[in-house]
Amino acid sequence: MASFNQQFLYSVLIIALGYALKRFNILKAKDGEGLSRIVFNLTLPALIVVTFSDFVIDPSLLLLIASCFLFGLLVAAIGLFVFRNEPRKIKGMVCMMVPGFNIGLFAYPLVEGIWGEKGIKYFGMFDVGNSFLVFGLIYLIGSYYSSDDVKLTAKDISFKMLKSIPFMTYIVVFILSIIGIHLPAFIVDTSKIISVANMPMSLLLLGLYLNFRFDKSYNKLLYKFLGIRYLIGLGLGILLFFILPFDNMFKYTLLMGLILPTSVAVLPYSVEFDYNQKFVGIASNVTILLSFFLLWGMTNIIM
């Protein structure tokens, strides 16, 4: 248990360092844009390559893909019902934030520090399902409600998914694992060197994006959003933890996965679809803080 708490402590310190660097104007929040591009397009794909380079497909892990995607569909449907009477743009903005998780920046650093490559493999499968939510369902909801005359095609969504380097890395490495082809050693070795930077850079980025200034006028909308994500996610995660006949790592993945923060993709999407970026930023920050303390508490109670 000491190692779990130690990892959380290290993570808090690195996040706090990122926040302090911003507060003292050594780094600015806008610097996070460049840092996030490095994480998503370089260090995270490198971590995926290292983790899945010798991955042996376990059929039970495929259920993690389905579980994540089905959960996203469930909470999206509930969100659309709960916010059905809100103005079109409000409904689109909040409902696109309900499904989807921040796994690349938030979960991977913690999981890597606690469980190592084994944990990354499980959460990686969960993240494949999440990718379909982030680049498919969330984009669809956000685009559809952004205006009254929007035209959205399967081609638009497919192109968005194909542009995601982490998602395509998953797909390529996953297919290679299925057909039994191993990546050349020099690619894996180079990826190992690069992947070491993923955890500290991701945590620093979270610190840069933290903002503790909240507008009280958003409270009612925020509470409804948080209620849908966390009451359902936590309740379902605990239920599945005790009834599923799988190994503990599988159950830990679902338990922790379903209470992760909202996807970071909602931030650029809010710009693209002209939503209230201030609210999206506040809600994203609240989910980061809430998820962090929930995960720390769940880790200490169950493990």
Image: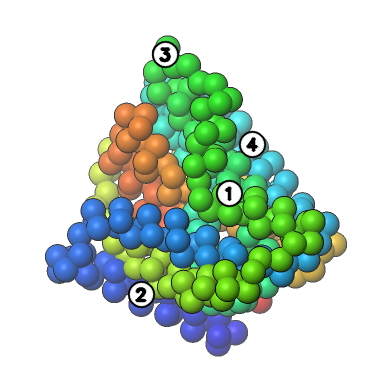
Which residue is depicted at the point 75% across and 70% down? 248
Residues 31 and 229: in front is 31
Q: Quadrant of the N terminus?
A: bottom right
Which residue is depicted at the point 72% across and 46% down? 66
Q: Quadrant of residue 247?
A: bottom right
Q: Quadrant of residue 146?
A: top left
From this viewpoint, is residue 235 visible? Answer: no
Residue 290 horizontal/vertical position (percent):
45, 59
Residues 267 and 179: in front is 179
From this viewpoint, is residue 184 visible? Answer: yes
Residue 244 horizontal/vertical position (percent):
81, 59
Could you tell which of marks 2 and 1 lies nearer the N-terminus?
Answer: 2
- Look at label 2 and name its amino acid: Ile
Callout in the foreground (1, 4):
1
**Label ID, residue 168:** 1
Callout in the foreground (1, 3):
1
- Look at label 1 and name its amino acid: Met
Q: CA distance from mark 2 to mark 4?
A: 34 Å
Could you tell which of marks 1 and 3 lies nearer the N-terminus?
Answer: 3
Residue 255 horizontal/vertical position (percent):
65, 60
